[in-house]
Image (cartoon, grey):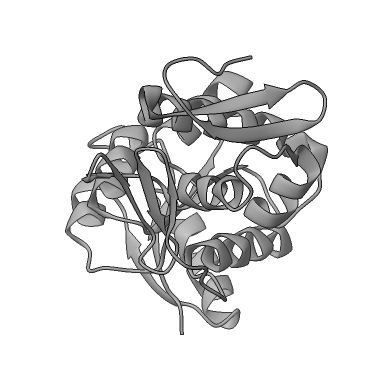
């Protein structure tokens, strides 16, 4: 049974959502503030409200992400593109604006859990100074570990499967996010941007405009 942590200060909303999630087969723990969330036991997925009474949810997201590869979905009323981009850059795997339907939330949770637990593992892949181990879900750069979010790792692992080849946007959306919906194109672009920052000059994620992205070894460069 997947373990979920719901971080939500609206107790009435939280109680209703806990019941709905339990009916869907989740073992749910509720935290009403940041302190409780950060002290909670390990789980498989976190549903995180941003408007918490003791600490901004974005900071909670960053701290949870620093701990490891738990799936994180932001549930919030903050609905601008800037809000979404900020949430994703803070380490969230997905971002859902309130109000939302339970069916959509469940589908997004399933997608995040699928990406966090791949159904098959390829062998270790090397590209220049990078070493990607899909089974262990680790990336090393010059022998030193690099921390990636689950989505960032899945995206990089997909690109490194075909180094130098352009992988179409639709393919990346389908294989990394489980959808071909072009509304997620901005999400893809944000994750590529954060990956570029973490890889530095060790590799280039190059844009094939209007088509997709390719990964190549090399020194600095690789942008839009």
Question: Considering depth in this image, is 45 or 125 the residue closer to the camera?
Answer: 125
51 relative to 27, above or below: above
Question: Considering depth in this image, is 107 or 180 the residue closer to the camera?
Answer: 180
Image location of residue 192, percent across then percent down: 55, 31
Q: Residue at x 55, y 33 (%)?
A: 216
Q: Residue at x 46, y 33 (%)?
A: 195
Q: Residue at x 72, y 64 (%)?
A: 103
43 relative to 24, above or below: above
Q: Is residue 47 visible?
A: yes
Q: Quadrant of the C terminus?
A: top right
Report whether 43 appears left or right of 187. Answer: left
Image location of residue 92, percent across then percent down: 46, 43
Question: Considering depth in this image, is 136 or 10 the residue closer to the camera?
Answer: 136
Image location of residue 152, percent across then percent down: 48, 44
Q: Is residue 78 visible?
A: no
Q: Quadrant of residue 90?
A: top left
- All told, the count of numbered labels is 0
Image location of residue 58, percent across then percent down: 36, 34
221 relative to 169, above or below: above
């Amino acid at each position: 049974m997947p373990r979920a942590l719901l971080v939500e200060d609206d107790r009435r909303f939280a109680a209703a959502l806990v019941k709905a999630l339990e009916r869907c087969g989740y073992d749910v723990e509720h935290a009403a503030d940041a302190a409780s969330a950060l002290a909670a036991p390990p789980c498989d997925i976190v549903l995180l409200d941003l408007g918490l009474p003791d600490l901004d949810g974005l900071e909670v997201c960053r701290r949870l992400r620093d701990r490891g590869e738990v799936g994180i979905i932001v549930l919030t009323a903050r609905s601008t593109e800037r809000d979404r981009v900020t949430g994703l850059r803070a380490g969230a795997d997905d971002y859902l604006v309130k109000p939302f339907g339970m069916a959509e939330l469940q589908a997004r949770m399933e997608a995040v859990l699928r990406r966090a637990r791949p159904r098959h593992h390829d062998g270790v892949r090397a590209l220049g100074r990078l070493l990607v181990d899909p089974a262990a879900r680790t990336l090393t750069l010059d022998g030193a570990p690099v921390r990636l979010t689950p989505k960032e790792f899945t995206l990089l692992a997909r690109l490194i499967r075909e180094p130098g080849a352009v992988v179409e946007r639709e393919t990346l959306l389908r294989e990394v996010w489980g959808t071909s919906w072009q509304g997620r194109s901005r999400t893809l672009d944000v994750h590529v941007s954060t990956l570029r920052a973490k890889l530095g000059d060790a590799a280039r994620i190059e844009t094939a405009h209007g088509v997709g992205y390719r990964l190549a070894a090399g020194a600095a460069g690789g942008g839009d």
